[in-house]
Amino acid sequence: SRMRQASETPPYPEVSVDLALSMPAAARPASPPVRPTAFSPEEEIAHGPALWLWDYLRRSGAGGFFLPLSGGSDSASVAMIVAALCHRLAERVRREAAASGGDATEGDTPGEGETQQVTRDLRRVLGLGQDQDPPDDPRALAGRLLTTAYLPTRVSGDASRERARAVARAVGADHLEVDVQAAVDALASASGSAALDPDDAPLRFAGEGGDASDQRALENLQARTRMVTAYLLAQRAPKLRGVRGPRLVLAAANVDEALVGYVTKYDAGAADLNPIGGVAKTDLRRFLAWARDALDAPDLDAVLQAVPSAELAPADEHGEQSDEREIGLTYEELSVLGRLRAEERCGPLEAFERARLAWPERTAGEVAERVKRFYRAYALHRHKATVATPSVHLEAYAPSDRRFDLRPYLIDPAWRWAFRAIDRKLHEGEPVPENAREDADR
C-alpha cells in the first residue's frame, strides 16, 4: 500500500534558478587537520564523566560540587574524576589566556573559532568579577570547586579517615570532618518511643544484643543520615566555607552494586549526580591505578589496597565488614554476570551455562549458587533502580535500563522455571525438556 501511494504521488515541481546556498567546493578553504585521539578505558573514565560534570555544573547555576569521602575506592574515583576535570579546565584557562595575550606558542592556542568560553564560565561559576582571572592550577581550582567531607560514626575506622584525608589532599579539595554519630543516636532513640515492649526500644547491633533486623536498621540509619548531612553541608557551604554555592552533591555508587541492590535506598548514593553510576568496580580500580600516575596521586595506593567495606557495623566473628562477603559474590563475578544479563541477553539458565565456561575452576554447584544469588538479588532490588541518581553510562549494562516501564521492577525473585532448569542440569545431568516452562507455569 505504501509503495503504491508513493508511486502514484505526483512529483514536486522543480524551478531552476541561478542561486546556491553554499560556496562552490573549490572556493571553500580546507579545515585544519584534526588528529584523532584514541583513549584507553581508564582515560575514558577520566574525561567522559568529568566533562559531563562540567557541562551540568555550568548550566545549573551551582558553585561547585560536594562529595562525601568514605576512604574507599568508589568515592576516591569520583574525587579523581573531579581532579581530571580541574586539570582539563586549568589547561584550557592557560590556553585561552595565551591566546588573548598574543604570546601563545604553537600548540597552546585554541583552534580557529574557539573563544574564551571556559574562562567566562569559570568566572561565573566561581563568582569572580570580569577583571579577575580564574585559577590556572588544577589543585587551586579543586579547592574552589570541590568540597569533600568524611562523615564518621562510632564504627568508622581510623584507616578510612586517613585515606579520605589523603584523597582530598591529592585532589586539593576543601575537606571537612563532621561526626554524625549524635544524629544517629538521636534518631535511634526517637524510634524507640514506638516500642510496645520497653525491652525492644533500644536499637543495637547484633553483636551488642540486638537481632538481625536491628542491625540492618542501624546500618541503613547511618547511611541515610550521611545523605541528609551531605545535603545540609552542601547548602551551607557558601556561609561555612566562604565559597560560592550551593554545591551539587555527588554520589559514589558503582554499577555492579546498584545492579544487585547493595545500596541503601536514599543513602549517600541519593545525590544530584553520580559520575560512576555506569562504571564497573573492576574498571574503577584500574582507573584509580591510572590516576595515581597520570594525576600524580601516590596516596591512592592505600585506597587500592583497602578491602571494600561500607563500615556500617562493628567487626563480628567473621572479622571486619566486607562488601564482597555480604554480597556473596566478588566484584569480578558481578561484572561477568552483569554483562551476561544485559549485553548477552542471558536469563539465569543461559548465564549458568556460560558462567561454567568462564569459571572452569569452580564446580557446577558453585556456579549455580552464584548465578542464583545474582539473579535473586537483581529481582528483589529492582525498586531501588527507580530512584537511581542520574549518571553517565559508560558500560553496556546498567541498573536503570528501562526506567520508563514499571514492569521490570516487578520480577519474581524465585525464578521458578529458570532455577528449576538449573537444578535439573546440575543434579540430574539431563537436558531441560522443551515443555519444562509449561510444566512450571501449571
Image (cartoon, rainbow, N blue to C red):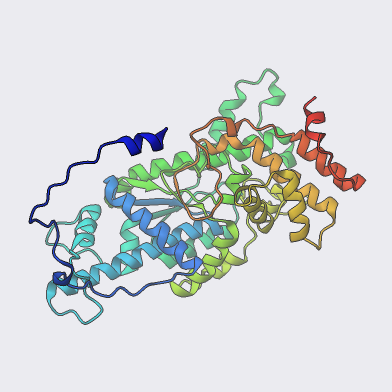
Q: Determine if residue 18 is in view.
A: yes
Please name whichever residue, 69 or 61, is drawn nearer the observer in this view of the structure: 61
Outermost top residue: 196
Residue drawn at (24%, 58%) of the image: 122
How many badges with numbers are in the image? 0
- The quadrant of the image that shows the N terminus is top left
Outermost right residue: 428
Height in image: 141 above or below 108? Answer: above
Q: Determine if residue 182 is in view.
A: no
- The quadrant of the image that shows the C terminus is top right
Residue drawn at (36%, 47%) of the image: 248
Q: Estimate the x, y position of residue 416 in percent, counting from the top left.
A: 77, 33
Q: Estimate the x, y position of residue 54 in percent, counting from the top left.
A: 33, 55
Q: Estimate the x, y position of residue 388 in percent, counting from the top left.
A: 50, 40
Q: Quadrant of residue 145?
A: bottom left
Please name whichever residue, 49 or 71, is drawn nearer the observer in this view of the structure: 49
Q: Is residue 43 left or right of residue 18?
A: right
Outermost left residue: 18
Q: Is residue 71 left or right of residue 56?
A: right
Q: Estimate the x, y position of residue 169 in percent, counting from the top left.
A: 43, 65
Q: Is residue 376 left or right of residue 100?
A: right
Residue drawn at (48%, 63%) of the image: 167
Height in image: 199 above or below 293? Answer: above
Q: Is residue 303 left or right of residue 318?
A: left
